[in-house]
């Protein structure tokens, strides 16, 4: 036996497949940590690439979670050509074979056959694997119910929009408002996630999402990082179509409650700077680690901030700062109106009483963090589900606005900031609605709350002996 642990072999072995990009692996690991703690006699083998593995497990280990490396698909000596999603495409080309091999290795290693697959929902092929192995398949969707619905109903959406085109000029009207996504009463076509109707529908990434939409109804359970009170209609519809469609988030509220992260040093003094500001006076600006607004938009934001004298905390990579207007950093630092940092502890910043608005790309984690803190948003979406999230924020939940025209201009930025910070005397409805959702989010993760109840159902699926 290779097994180095003492005592009897585990009662059950669950294989976990991470999609090794962006925030996908840490979110899946958060889920697996909760499962591992709820089911201590189950062993979870966690498959990701060496790079992702290293960053996830460098300061964390747990007796019943075992990391295993799979190849990233990058050939020896490969030179990246800077193509869109190049790393993702290389990985997707080898993923199925790598994961199938990995399961065999882990089974031999742990001495128990895999009895359940818990995977990033992107890996549609794991449904076939689970079927062959006759075991439950848990497909974890890391984003919102809105984007899951758009991918689940992609064939319906495509066929209804082609009917719409018949008799018209044949050119899709991107501004057309339709009711094609069950659970969302109205949606503008161009705000659907890329790969559903617009964008490159044949790319490996779009194909993966399309196949996921077509197979996910076979999953034994579909947990998502959201809470059902946010989207009652979507939850009703998806629950009728999917097995055990389970809202078990927001994860950001659960992690901060159950395992407070080792209090990260406020490396760039964001919190101490916020301490000195008036309540709800500061605009917090951050577009995550991937999205980069073009230089002219950075200039527009900077000019709007200087003109309105609105206080701001801006988290931006060092590289982009060179595009700021001449003297912007010096002037705003000198008069104390702003602070620019390369990194900010986002959850703590959003929870700080001085923050009044979050200027964001509308990525799902940022949206949940803003809702969890009750902070309204100004959104400038870039790709993926960000447009759809922005639509929901503005039109459905009413907790923020999309930047006018979809990108930053000086005038648009100024109007959005004044409106959301209620400086122009507009009613405070946005703030009230986001406060109400914040309450619901916090209730959902209470011991009695819906997300916690749903999590118990999920534990049941994962620990059940047979399908
Ligand atoms: C969900 O939407 C689909 C597609 O429109 C529909 O067939 C189904 O009846 C809906 N389910 C519920 C419970 O509304
Ligand atoms: C950015 O600049 C700050 C301050 O000059 C420095 O501490 C930080 O390490 C830099 N970050 C990167 C990623 O270069
Ligand atoms: C849980 O819910 C029940 C019934 O809905 C309620 O009576 C009870 O007080 C709740 N417990 C907690 C801890 O909230
Ligand atoms: C190649 C690599 O770094 N893989 C690591 C995955 O994570 C585990 C736990 O830290 C390491 O043991 C592996 O070396």
Image: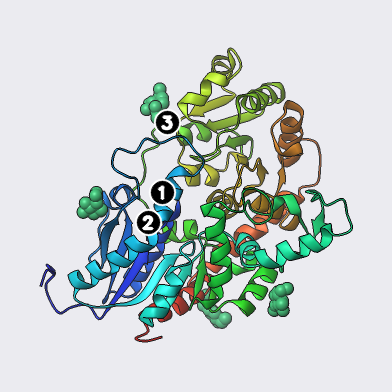
Residue 392, position in %: x, y? 69, 55
Query: In the structure shown, which secondary structural element does the residue marked by tag 3 occupy?
Result: loop
Classify the position of the C terminus by image quarter. bottom left
Q: Residue at x 59, y 12 (%)?
A: 326
To which quarter of the image does residue 291 belong?
Answer: top right
- Residue 82, visible in the rendered structure: yes
- Residue 394 appears in the figure: no
Q: In the picture provided, is 178 more to the left or to the right than 112?
A: right
User: Residue placed at 49% from the left, 47% from the top?
Assistant: 347
* Residue matched to label 1: 90
The residue shown at (58%, 67%) is 213
Residue 1: image x %, image y %? 10, 73
Residue under label 3, please give it: 268
Taking the spot 23% from the left edge, 67% from the top edge, the residue there is 105
Rate crowding at label 1 as few (under 14), some (14 to 19) or many (20 or more) other CA atoms within 10 Å: some
Q: On residue 94, which mark appears?
A: 2
Left or right of 438, for residue 131: left
Q: Are marks 2 and 1 in contact (CB under 8 Å)?
A: yes
Pick the residue in front: 269 or 75.
75
Task: Please name whichever residue, 292 or 170, is drawn nearer the observer in this view of the structure.
Answer: 170
Whole-angstrom CA distance, mark 2 to mark 3, is 41 Å
**CA separation in Å, label 3 and label 1:** 37 Å
User: For the residue labelled by badge 2, is the local secondary structure a helix, a strand or a loop?
Assistant: helix
Q: Is residue 143 above or below residue 311?
A: below
Distance CA(mark 2)–CA(mark 1) = 7 Å
Callout 1 secondary element: helix
Viewer-proximal residue among 404 and 19? 19
Kindly tell me whether mark 3's CB lies below 8 Å from ligand 2.
yes
């Amino acid at each position: 036996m290779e097994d180095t642990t003492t005592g009897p072999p585990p009662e059950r072995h669950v294989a976990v497949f991470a999609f090794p990009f962006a925030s996908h692996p840490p979110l899946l690991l958060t889920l697996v940590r909760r499962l591992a703690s709820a089911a201590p006699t189950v062993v979870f083998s966690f498959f990701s690439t060496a790079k992702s593995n290293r960053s996830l497990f460098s300061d964390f280990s747990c007796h019943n979670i075992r990391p295993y490396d799979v190849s990233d698909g990058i050939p020896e000596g490969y030179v990246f050509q800077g193509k869109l999603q190049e790393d993702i495409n290389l990985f997707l080309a080898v993923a199925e074979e790598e994961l199938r091999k990995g399961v065999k290795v882990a089974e031999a290693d742990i001495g128990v056959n895999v009895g359940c697959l818990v995977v990033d929902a992107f890996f549609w092929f794991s449904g076939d694997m689970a079927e062959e192995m006759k075991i439950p398949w848990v497909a974890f969707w890391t984003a919102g119910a809105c984007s899951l619905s758009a991918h689940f109903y992609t064939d319906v959406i495509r066929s209804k929009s082609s009917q719409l085109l018949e008799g018209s000029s044949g050119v899709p009207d991107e501004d057309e408002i339709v009711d094609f996504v069950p659970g969302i009463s109205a949606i503008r076509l161009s705000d659907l996630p890329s790969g559903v109707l617009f964008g490159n529908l044949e790319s490996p990434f779009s194909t993966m999402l399309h196949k996921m939409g077509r197979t996910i109804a076979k999953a034994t359970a579909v947990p998502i990082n959201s809470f059902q009170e946010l989207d009652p209609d979507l939850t009703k519809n998806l629950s009728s179509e999917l097995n055990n469609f389970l809202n078990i988030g927001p994860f950001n509220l659960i992690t901060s409650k159950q395992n407070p992260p080792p209090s990260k040093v406020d490396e760039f003094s964001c919190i101490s700077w916020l301490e000195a500001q008036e309540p709800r006076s500061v605009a917090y600006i951050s577009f995550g680690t991937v999205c980069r607004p073009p230089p002219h938009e950075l200039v527009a934001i900077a000019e709007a901030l200087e003109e309105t004298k609105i206080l701001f905390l801006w988290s931006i990579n060092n590289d982009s700062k060179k595009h700021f207007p001449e003297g912007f950093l010096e002037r705003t630092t000198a008069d104390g109106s702003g602070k620019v940092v390369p990194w900010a502890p986002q959850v703590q910043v959003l929870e700080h009483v001085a923050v009044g608005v979050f200027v964001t790309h509308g990525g799902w984690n940022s949206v949940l963090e803003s809702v969890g803190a009750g902070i309204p948003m100004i959104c400038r979406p870039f790709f993926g589900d960000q447009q759809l999230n922005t639509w929901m924020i503005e039109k459905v939940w009413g907790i923020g606005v999309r930047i006018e025209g979809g990108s930053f201009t000086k005038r648009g930025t100024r109007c959005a900031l004044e409106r959301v910070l209620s400086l122009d005397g507009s009613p405070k409805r946005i703030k009230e609605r986001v406060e109400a959702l914040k309450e619901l989010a916090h209730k959902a993760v209470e011991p009695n709350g819906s997300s916690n109840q749903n999590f118990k159902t999920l534990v049941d699926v994962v620990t059940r002996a047979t399908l």
